[in-house]
Image: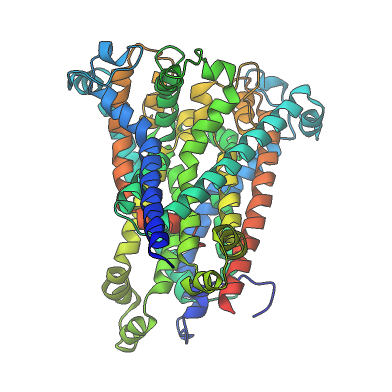
Amino acid sequence: MTLSMKRRKVWFGHALSIVTILIALLAFFPIFWMVVTSFKTEGDAYTSPPTIVFKPTLENYQIALQQSHYFTYLGNTIVITFFAAAAALLLGIPAAYSLAYYPRRRNNFTLMWVMSTRMLPPVGVIVPLYVVFKNLALFDTHLGLILLYTTVNLPLVIWMMRSFFADLPYETIEAARIDGATLLQEFGYVILPLALPGLMATLLLCVIFTWNEFFIAFNLTITQASPLSVFIVSFKTSEGLFWAKMSAAATLTALPVVIAGWVAQRQLVRGLTAGAVK
Amino acid sequence: MAENTLRLPQATAIPNVPKKTPQQSRFSLLSPAIIYLVLLTQIPVLFTLSYSFSNWNFLRPERTRFVGLDNYTGFVQDSDTLTIIRNTLAFATSVVLLSLIIGMILALLLNRPFFGRGLARTLLITPFLIMPTVSAVMWKNMLFSPTFGLINAFLGIFGTTTIDWINQFPMASIVMIVTWEWTPFMMLILLAGLQSLVQEHLEAAQIDGAGPLELFFYVILPHLRRYIEIGVLLELLFVLNIFGEIFVTTTGGPANSTTTLTFNIYLEAFKRWNVGRASAYGIIAVILANVITFVFLRVIRGNEQKAGT
């Protein structure tokens, strides 16, 4: 290879890197613009052409937080997300443990069946859920949504935790067993500390999916238990009137999951593909 | 191992599993989760199935009776059905194909070391993390708005006339939003695939004189096949369930030009209160999802058998 060819290759590499970063900035731009708009006054937000020069204000956040029952929706989302993730981990970890360490002939079938429940389209069950929830007074309650989101999270927990458990060094677990550790000791002192990073990733994925869910929440709540995903939809016809406030509310609403996703990004693929891709 | 069983790499990675643990404890660990899933997923589907054979309408519950397969034959005969199927296909295939192509380009771009790669990757996955209803509200108001939207402001630089995106191109607008959201998903799967490619194979092909295009089509693409299949099938499953983006932007309209199967079930159930029909369509959606899931499971089984050899 001649020197000039080499040099051209290096420059081509730099050009590709710059193109990649530009595309990334372009893809991110709508989000950036939303955050910027949240610091504008409504007058600045609503100009043609859109303006980039303005005096930043925190007014929208104050209004979004104080006037629109934002905290009620936020509270609902937090309660629902927390308990649905906790319940799914409580039910799912023992199941994953059993599937990882006690191979049985039917394990593969069980895993595939668990996966198929995850892929069940919500529209296929929403009507009976609506009917049953109305009859059992679960409609528009936290408990109702927690029960359903636990169902959505559970297959994810089982598949992910099983895959993390199976990756652990088996000798360590065997050593604990030989030393006479009970199931609980083995689990609490050996497996859990080792699988903790996987557990955190699983938890974050549960949080991401539950926090963002809309269809079930929208159809099975009215006001009492509605989470933020439903609240945000009230801005759907806000054409030009409340862009700054809408942006403030939307930014606050999306932020926790964006951070959770950034933290868990290495495990995101594994969780999304049920461990099929690591 | 028998051909007809799923072989998981992790399962084969555990040697000498103790047989002494009583079977009972295993079932007491597994069964709560299984029972829970049966109660909240399988039983409701059975309910849906039974509703689908009735003409139950919430507005006229007293007239409910068994109507056999009428709701299903109604689906075949209904004049809107063709439109709904066409919308569903157009929507799902456009989103999946676009995100596959763009995701592939981005994965290839990200699969080389450069300063700022971590940041670029983080920025690129963010659209996937944003709450879908937030994305929809944001795109609808701030990007697609005819007078004050960013896209028209940008196109205005080139002298393009004002476009009312959501009204003039409703389906394309929704496809754009959902593609923006789901491209990172495809990108991440393909990137994982690229990173599992053995560098020596690439180098060997390069030494043999393969150019970039030959490398891509004869080395990279065959290697990525399974990853593409997994990405396409999973995304298809998720995208077919898309509801919020349609609800926020077009509510299925104008007329029913953006009504997909999922959205139509919502309309039947909660706008027309037609439980019987919504349930029949729901069963169709369940069957469709199960077919795709079945293919997906076959693909990952093949994947693992390949990895096992």
Quarter of the view holding residue B227: bottom right
* Image coordinates for residue B66, horizontal then vertical, percent: 77, 31
Closest to the observer, A179 or A134: A179
- Eyeballing the image, is A113 above or below A237? below
* Image coordinates for residue A61, horizontal then vertical, percent: 22, 23
Residue at 36% across, 26% down: A224
Quarter of the view holding residue B217: bottom right
Q: Along the horizontal axis of the image, is A134 left or right of B150?
A: right
Residue at 46% across, 19% down: B158
* Image coordinates for residue B220, horizontal then vertical, percent: 56, 62
Residue at 60% across, 51% down: B233
- Eyeballing the image, is B175 above or below A164? above
Q: How is the image coloured?
A: rainbow
Whether residue B164 can be seen here: yes
Residue at 68% across, 45% down: B288
Whether residue A87 can be seen here: no
Q: Along the horizontal axis of the image, is B182 left or right of A174?
A: right
- Eyeballing the image, is A126 above or below B122? above
Closest to the observer, B248 or B57: B248
| Quadrant showing the N terminus of chain A | bottom left
* Image coordinates for residue B277, horizontal then vertical, percent: 70, 29
Closest to the observer, A7 or A15: A7
| Quadrant showing the C terminus of chain A | bottom left
Quarter of the view holding residue A217: top left
- Eyeballing the image, is B27 above or below B296? below
Closest to the observer, B233 or B142: B142
